[in-house]
Amino acid sequence: MLTAATSSHRPSTRVTRFCRSGLTSVVSELRKEGIAETSADLLAAKDLLELGIGQMSTPTSALSHPFQVQPVIGAHVLHADVERSLTDPDVVLLHADLPDDTAPGPVRVVWFNMSTLVGGTATVEPTRVEDGTYRAEGRMRAGHGVVVAGIVPGDGGSPGFALVAE
């Protein structure tokens, strides 16, 4: 995980970057420290790696933005967003709009805080919204720091991934 300034030709914007190798190193360190293989933190980190999380970057100042890798169900690329709560910045909110022509099953949310080395998973049941489509929403107390998250649609979809800056 790196934070760097962008080119001097543009206004100064800090960018937070995530690399898969950083999470791989965290998993190794947690194991060396004797963290139980069944701990929620270690399971979440391993799960993100198994799902295929890769390199991502985001403006450090972005409180709300689309997932860097959008989840997919069948032929539908879903729209998923991530944001920090304005009233409690330790809370990260995820939501994905699901296609209305499918009967969506539960959606799994996986997250890991690269700063505090805490992570977890949750299962979210989609709800029908006013326009007739379905939406899955997750709320995690991820804490302050850089957070990586995945959202995994049920029904055999492909996961989406997001990086949330401090």
Image (cartoon, rainbow, N blue to C red):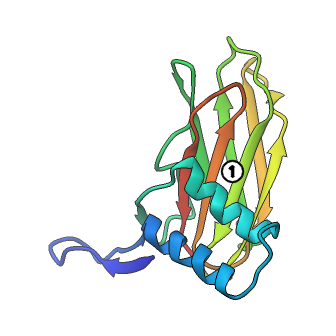
User: Left or right of 34: which side holds 22?
Assistant: left
Picture quadrant where residue 157 is located: top right
Position in image of residue 70 (x %, y %): 51, 40
User: Left or right of 100: which side holds 13?
Assistant: left
The residue sitting at 78% across, 23% down in the picture is: 130
The residue sitting at 75% across, 17% down in the picture is: 132
Count neighbours of disc 1 (C-alpha within 10 A) and say few if under 14, some if 14 to 19, many if 20 or more.
many
Name the outermost residue toward the top.
Answer: 101
The residue sitting at 82% across, 42% down in the picture is: 124
Position in image of residue 92 (x %, y %): 71, 62
User: Left or right of 107: which side holds 127?
Assistant: right
Position in image of residue 99 (x %, y %): 65, 20
How many numbered discs, if any?
Answer: 1
- Above/below status of 122 relative to 155: below
Quarter of the image that includes the N terminus: bottom left
- Above/below status of 50 relative to 125: below
Residue matched to label 1: 94
Toward the viewer: 160 or 91? 160
Mark 1 residue type: Leu
